Amino acid sequence: MCMKKYNFNAGPSMLPREVIENTAKQILDFNGSGLSIMEISHRAKDFQPVVDEAMSLIKELLDIPTGYSVIFLGGGASMQFTQIPANFLIKKAGYLNTGSWAKKALKEAKLYGEVVEVASSADKNYTYLPHDFKIPADLDYLHLTTNNTIYGTEIREDINSPVPLIADMSSDIMSRPVDVSKYTAIYAGAQKNMAMAGVTVIIVKDDMLDKAPRELPTMLNYRTHVDKGSMFNTPPVVPIYSLLETMRWVKANGGVKEMDRRAKERAEILYAEIDRNKLFHGTVAEADRSLMNICFVMNEDYKELEKPFLDFATERGMVGIKGHRSVGGFRASCYNAQTLEGVNALVKAMKDFEAQH
């Protein structure tokens, strides 16, 4: 019997067991067709319902108003750093620089027009979120990265803005309610809270399309994919199926309100231990702490215990808790599928290790 593993990977990350099992069944035999879902045509009559149900569940779970479309593309959120400004930057866009991914998005946007860095937390290695910044009223949009996977900060509420928002929600989508009506677009690489890697989910406001003052390549134009129902070219078939299974799981488990409650419960337990334990401290301003990616490091006096603790935790089944090289220390990613059992196992390892020192 192999030891139980607790998956804290930052992404691709933990998925609910039933999502993995149900997807695996379809890989062997899709809907009793005798064919694997890996080898069917994306235009097969049985696959269209998968796309339709996945789209409608996303609309239902996030309470998306009419006038928005959901599309499934390849290329990850990183491709969206280009596609967003290509479609929506007319004269001037604002970007909030709160981490590595926000900075990358800002860099790509500059290829399409004037870009203003509205506020930044780079001065303190992204360990806090800017607050009380002024948003210019003449922006086409303000771009946010709602959760910073590497540094462990999170904008967990829809901010009030005089201009439409666009958000990269790759690592916290489906973990809380969102007022989609405030956004021109929301995009997310699905491999944290929604699916296996390979599909990117984009929610776009239909009446904001077709306004860009430039000719767009067919594949970069959101209109192409809205009109063709994400079937302009072959979509990532198996990742979309895993997305459907995850959305069914979120709905069966109480929707985004319940995901939010669970996220708060998990984070409270883990942050409480980080703050109590003499060996560790959190890396982020308390008010800005992420519920998804919980980052912590060794206290100065115990620096030399970093590697021993990592080994100690790994021996007890923790997977993926090594911090990103930009921060060091540890990072426990607690997406929707993470369990209280997993969080409590990590807390116990922290307590047991402390007792030895």
Image (cartoon, rainbow, N blue to C red):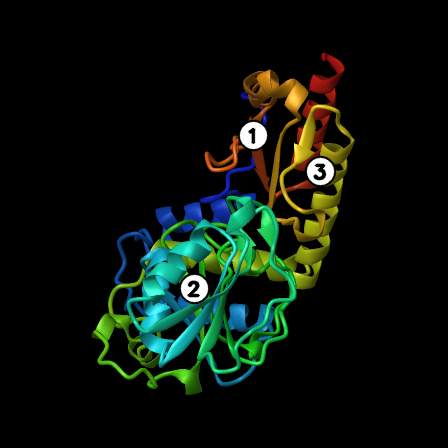
| Position of residue 271 measured from the top left corner of the image (x, y, whole percent) | 72, 39
- Closest to the camera, between mark 2 and mark 3, is 3
Residue 313, quarter of picture: top right
Mark 1 neighbour density, 10 Å: few (under 14) some (14–19) many (20 or more): many
Residue 300: x percent and y percent?
65, 24
The residue under label 1 is which amino acid type?
A: Gly
Q: Residue at x 26, y 64 (%)?
A: 234
Q: Which residue carries the number 2 mark?
A: 201
Is 83 displayed left or right of 284 in the figure? left
> Which element is circle 1 on?
loop
The numbered mark, 2 or 3, whose residue comes first in the sequence reads 2
Disc 2: CA contacts within 10 A as few (<14), some (14-19) or many (>=20): many
Does residue 137 sit above or below 195 in this rendering? below
Q: Amino acid at mark 2?
A: Val
Residue drawn at x 55%, y 54% is 147
Task: Pick the residue in front: 127 or 349.
Answer: 127
Distance between mark 2 and mark 3 Cα atoms: 30 Å
Q: Earlier in the sequence, mark 3 or mark 1?
A: 3
* Residue 243 appears in the figure: yes
